[in-house]
Image (cartoon, rainbow, N blue to C red):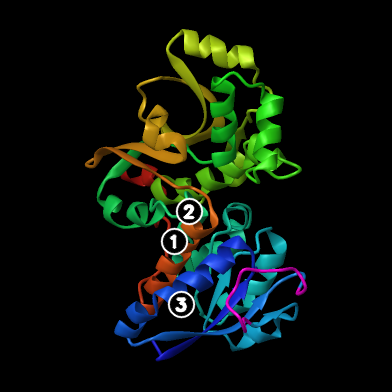
Amino acid sequence: MPNTLHLGMLGGGTVGAGVLRLLRERENRLAALGTRFHLRGVLVRDVVKPRDVPEGTPITTNPEFLRDCDVIVELMGGVDRPLELILPHLQAGKPVVTANKAMLAERWEVLRSFVEAGLVHYEASVMAGTPVLTPLATVLRGSRVTHLQAILNGTCNFILSRMEEGGSYEDALKEAQRLGYAEEDPTLDVGGFDAAHKLTVLARLVGDPGFRFEDVSVTGIDTLTLDDVRTAAAKGERIKLVGEFVRKGETWSAAVAPRRLPADHPLCSAGASRNALWLSGEGCGELFFSGGGAGGLVTASAVVGDLFSVVSNVPGQRPLPRPSAAEW
């Protein structure tokens, strides 16, 4: 790697501000690797909007600076616009760091070859700062994962927790919106689609590198009632929005749906109050990951970790080279 890497950022919101803060705080670690980052620009939609970024941060609505960048960090969200902006960079053989699960899930046919080449680093796209993708793409390749269950959406987890305390779905959703956990239009979260995007990303690392987002069965929590939650509690169960990827004969099945789980299930533990992932495999046995799955600084920590991988010439999280059915 050159001594100075020219960095471009797409999106200057909470996560982007966290990335810039952490890069400044980690300058000594970068110096130890013989590298520093030079920020060429931060692409935003509104340059007037107040932002918690270091003074002098080059904020702009003009993407021309991207042509001179060695690495791009994509944090703007959406699907087609970020893809349009990063594609020329990838085609030039340059790395991208992204937290964009929707783009990865829905535009795989465009991105797959670049991800397979190790040019795309995307640890922050699933469970944010809780590392699950890199272990799946590296050390766990020595095992065969047969079953995976995960809580992948913090908004739904919050709403269900409030309902367990006696609140209605409507009141819990309003509180989530007031606190900034849910958008004005919460469909992406409560409809299960955000979790389905993340489950699709996971599926390509453990079961089928060609797994399609469209093949995930999706049911959200928006039809749950307080009676449903109370009925489950009376039987010693808790309702969670669970993403599940499991082997079915020679194929894989993927679904996101509210599930009634025993209260002692790993996904119902205190550690699962944010995001959590449980998996079972031949070789690794049962494993459980839990931690922060959202939030500006939490997500930024995974982005910066991926940037350190870029500096160290470590490739991004590659999918399986072929469907695991070929090994059975």
The amino acid pointed to by label 3 is Arg
Residue identifier under label 3: 24
Gap between marks 3 and 1 measured at Cα? 15 Å
Location of residue 74 (image quadrant): bottom right
Residue 277 — which label? none
CA–CA distance between discs 2 and 3? 20 Å
Name the magenta segment's main secondary structure: loop
* Residue at image location 30% in from the left, 52% down from the top: 141
Which stretch did the figure color magenta? 47-57
Identify the amino acid type marked 2. Ala
**Amino acid type, residue under disc 1 in the picture:** Ala
**Label 3 packing within 10 angstroms: few (<14), some (14-19), many (20+):** few
Question: 67 above or below 276?
Answer: below
> From the image, which quarter does the N terminus lie in?
bottom left
**Position of residue 94 measured from the top left corner of the image (x, y, whole percent):** 51, 79
Q: Are marks 3 and 1 in contact (CB under 8 Å)?
A: no
Element at badge 2? loop
Q: Residue at x 35, y 51 (%)?
A: 136
2 or 1: tag closer to the N-terminus: 2
Query: Magenta stretch containing residue 48, yes or no?
Result: yes
Tell me: 176 left or right of 249.
right
Residue 248's x, y, as percent? 43, 30
Q: Residue at x 40, y 51 (%)?
A: 130
Q: Are marks 2 and 1 in contact (CB under 8 Å)?
A: yes
Would you say residue 149 is visible in this rendering?
Answer: no
The residue sitting at 26% across, 46% down in the picture is 143
Q: Secondary structure at mark 3?
A: helix
| In this picture, residue 279 sits left or right of residue 152 | left
Q: Which residue is mark 1?
A: 302
Q: Classify residue 47 by image quadrant.
A: bottom right
